[in-house]
Image (cartoon, rainbow, N blue to C red):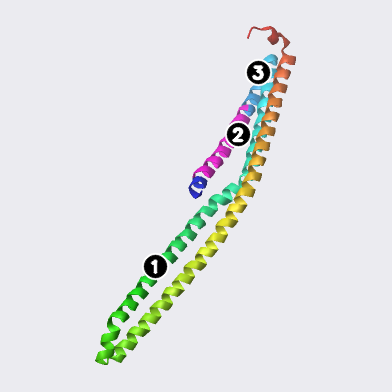
């Protein structure tokens, strides 16, 4: 999932950027048509004014779509930012498991030493050395149990966070996808109406063009 988020979200963000850039370019083209209409003759002036009006209206609607999509993508961006912290959390989990294994191996080694040398030390009367081995074995076992408990705590917290993030992702993403679909549908419908009205304005201003062969 983290890999999918890391790959998909930047592409979605890039799509919004392209839509915004498209709106800027169309708006710039509309402004240029408006400038040209001021220096052309009447017929060309009227045609360029109609075209400029259509382009500028289309640009405003396209840039508004980009803003709507940016707002709808906030949950996706949040998940994208969370990937970094999720990776850090899984790194903590891995470190806790590594420490747990290391302490368990150390405890087992000390316990093995005690079992192997206990009889010999008792027979030879080296009770001080025997006591040291016993203390080391007890301390090693305590450290191993502490490391195991710590690893379990980290696992519990990680499990809760993963479940919480997954739940929020399912709900938020579904809502965001609906908003994106609605925004795109309404934008395309309005842009279609813009260009249909622009064509109608052309036909009204230049009815003779309707009789020309296509």
Q: Nearer the viewer, mark 3 or mark 1?
A: 1
Relative to residue 208, is residue 33 depicted above or below? Answer: below
For label 1, the SS is helix
Residue drawn at x 56%, y 39% is: 17
Residue 53 at x, y = what percent?
Answer: 69, 26
The quadrant of the picture occupied by the C terminus is: top right
Crowd around label 3: few <14 · some 14–19 · many ≥20 (10 Å):
few
Examine the image and state in which quarter residue 142 appears.
bottom left
156 or 60, which is in the foreground?
156
Residue 125 at x, y = what percent?
Answer: 27, 92
Residue 140 in sight from this viewpoint: yes
Residue 207 at x, y = what percent?
Answer: 73, 11
Residue drawn at x 61%, y 33% is: 23
Residue 38 in sight from this viewpoint: no
Relative to residue 84, is residue 106 depicted above or below? Answer: below
Can you identify the residue that label 1 sits on?
101
Instruction: Give the distance between the C-alpha atoms of the residues marked 2 and 1, in whole angstroms.
Output: 59 Å
Examine the image and state in which quarter residue 103 appears.
bottom left
| Stretch of the chain drawn in magenta | 7-29
154 or 129, which is in the foreground?
129
Residue drawn at x 30%, y 88% is: 129
Can you identify the residue that label 3 sits on?
40
């Amino acid at each position: 999932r983290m890999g999918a988020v890391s790959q998909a979200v930047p592409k979605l963000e890039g799509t919004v950027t392209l839509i915004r850039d498209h709106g800027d370019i169309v708006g710039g083209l509309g402004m240029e048509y408006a400038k040209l209409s001021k220096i052309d003759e009447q017929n060309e002036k009227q045609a360029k004014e109609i075209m400029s009006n259509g382009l500028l209206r289309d640009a405003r609607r396209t840039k508004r779509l980009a803003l709507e999509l940016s707002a709808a993508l906030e949950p996706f961006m949040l998940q994208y930012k969370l990937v970094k912290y999720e990776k850090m959390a899984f790194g903590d989990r891995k470190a806790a498991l590594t420490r747990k294994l290391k302490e368990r191996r150390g405890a087992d080694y000390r316990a093995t030493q005690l079992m192997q040398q206990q009889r010999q030390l008792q027979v030879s009367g080296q009770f001080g050395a025997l006591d040291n081995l016993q203390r080391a074995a007890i301390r090693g076992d305590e450290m191993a149990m502490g490391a195991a408990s710590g690893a379990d705590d980290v696992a519990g917290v990680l499990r809760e966070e993963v479940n919480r993030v997954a739940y929020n992702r399912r709900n938020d993403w579904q809502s965001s996808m609906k908003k994106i679909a609605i925004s795109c549908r309404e934008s395309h419908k309005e842009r279609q109406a813009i260009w249909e009205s622009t064509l109608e304005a052309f036909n009204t201003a230049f009815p003779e063009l309707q009789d020309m062969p296509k």
